[in-house]
């Protein structure tokens, strides 16, 4: 599988599998097991698994294009997929020294394993890099106790990359990452996901209560560094790609409405009759294309890192969250009651777009980081 083929496969899945059930899954907050099965069968779950481990070994650019294609049909599934790929990136990074990671990746390559992240905690909220939970250790095992918040695919993923302070930690940044399997005793979802948007991704709180995992489950004792350097670039690019998919979906739905809705007394479509609506559509196109260019730019930086790479990684999610809100809101204004009353899917796109701004790292936190970076102030 190469880049172009991966995007082609994603578009076909979006059309044939995701789109037909997206509205109903959103309405009922239903996790799409059919979509995950289709992603597994297609090979897309193994997108970033290196060729040496049986995957296609594709990078952030292909990842962004695949996520955007999925998000045009169903942003919830795109979010599930994004979090899976971020989890897989952790497994890939530590596969050489972790038999547990290699075993999980073998199943990912077979299309039989869904991963996700369990970083954010109730006690540290949007500061996902600073877990308040602390592991304890026996000779051959760790015991984890934590209240994790907003774990995408909660109860559905096969493995979770879980953060926590190391047993001898004195600061939250002295943390580790563990791979915890779905059936680990004491690990469970503690609430149902019933939110404004992204309603079909099962992003629920999870609790680890005296959850014992083998010592081999510790992927790294440098959790803080790994969350920022391994996960955050893929996470931010993926979230920006979800936003781009929502922008494109809103743009297409708006254009369709302006072409088909009529002023019968004028004998013209809305788009033909009202120049202000055409101007709104143009603004939406400009913003979507600008976001696409920003994502392409940050992918170039990740492929060839330089002194501005960290800044670009921070900027892309901040910009994407606000762009998606702007474009989807403009779509509702442009289509009027047809969008507001759910006669199109634009209302769903608008609700889904709100998630990007409040998902850690939030737009406000990212702006703080960006300001510090510009001034040469340490981020932490």
Image (cartoon, rainbow, N blue to C red):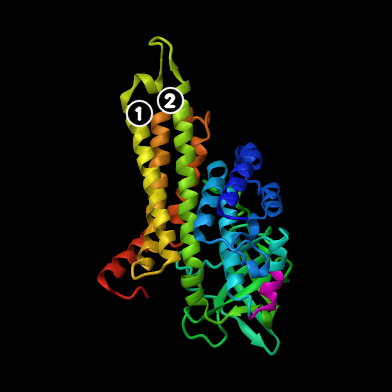
Residue 98 covered by magenta stretch: yes
3D distance between C-alphas at marks 2 and 1: 8 Å
Report the side of 217 relative to 367 (left or right). right
Residue 7 covered by magenta stretch: no
Badge 2 local density, few (<14 within 10 Å), some, or many (20+)?
Answer: many
What segment is highlighted magenta in the picture?
97-104
Residue at the image point whose x is 67% and y is 60% from the top: 114
Q: Position of residue 370 (x, y in %)?
A: 32, 64
Looking at the rendering, which quadrant does residue 373 occupy? bottom left
Is 230 drawn above or below residue 327 in the view shown? below
Residue holding disc 1: 278
Looking at the rendering, which quadrant does residue 303 occupy? bottom left
Residue 151 appears in the rendering: no
Work out whether residue 42 or residue 241 is closer to the camera in this orientation and state it. 42
Residue at the image point whose x is 71% and y is 87% from the top: 140
Res. 372 mark: none
Work out whether residue 84 or residue 347 is closer to the camera in this orientation and state it. 84
Looking at the rendering, which quadrant does residue 273 occupy? top left
Res. 258 mark: 2
Q: Quadrant of the N terminus?
A: bottom right
Is 168 drawn above or below residue 110 in the view shown? below
Report the side of 251 relative to 165 (left or right). left
Q: Quadrant of the C terminus?
A: bottom left
């Amino acid at each position: 599988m190469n880049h172009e083929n991966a995007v082609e496969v994603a578009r076909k899945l979006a059309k044939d599998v995701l789109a037909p059930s997206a509205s109903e899954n959103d309405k009922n907050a239903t996790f799409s097991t059919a979509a995950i099965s289709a992603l597994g069968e297609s090979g897309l779950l193994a997108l970033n698994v290196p060729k040496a481990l049986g995957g296609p070994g594709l990078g952030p650019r292909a990842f962004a294009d695949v996520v955007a294609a999925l998000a045009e049909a169903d942003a919830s599934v795109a979010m599930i997929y994004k979090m899976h790929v971020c989890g897989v990136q952790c497994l890939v990074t530590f596969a050489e020294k972790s038999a547990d990671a290699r075993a999980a990746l073998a199943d990912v390559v077979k299309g039989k394993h869904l991963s996700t992240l369990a970083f954010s905690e109730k006690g540290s909220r949007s500061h996902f890099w600073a877990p308040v939970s602390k592991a304890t250790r026996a000779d051959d095992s760790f015991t984890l106790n934590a209240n994790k918040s907003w774990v995408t695919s909660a109860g559905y993923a096969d493995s979770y990359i879980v953060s926590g302070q190391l047993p001898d930690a004195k600061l939250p940044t002295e943390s580790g990452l563990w791979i915890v399997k779905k059936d680990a005793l004491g690990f469970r979802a503690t609430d149902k996901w019933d939110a404004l948007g992204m309603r079909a991704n099962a992003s629920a709180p999870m609790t680890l209560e005296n959850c014992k995992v083998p010592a081999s489950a510790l992927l790294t004792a440098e959790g803080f560094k790994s969350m920022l350097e391994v996960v955050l670039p893929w996470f931010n690019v993926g979230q920006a790609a979800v936003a781009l998919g929502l922008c494109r979906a809103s743009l297409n739905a708006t254009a369709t409405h302006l072409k088909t809705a009529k002023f019968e007394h004028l004998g013209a479509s809305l788009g033909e009759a009202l120049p202000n609506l055409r101007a709104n559509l143009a603004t939406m196109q400009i913003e979507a294309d600008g976001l696409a260019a920003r994502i392409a730019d940050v992918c170039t930086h990740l492929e060839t890192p330089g002194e501005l790479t960290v800044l670009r990684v921070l900027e892309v999610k901040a910009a994407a969250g606000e762009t998606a809100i702007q474009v989807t809101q403009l779509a509702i204004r442009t289509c009027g009651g047809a969008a507001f009353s759910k006669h199109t899917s634009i209302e769903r796109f608008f609700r889904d777009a709100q998630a990007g701004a409040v998902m850690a790292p939030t737009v406000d936190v990212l702006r703080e980081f960006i300001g510090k970076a510009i001034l040469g102030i340490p981020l932490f």
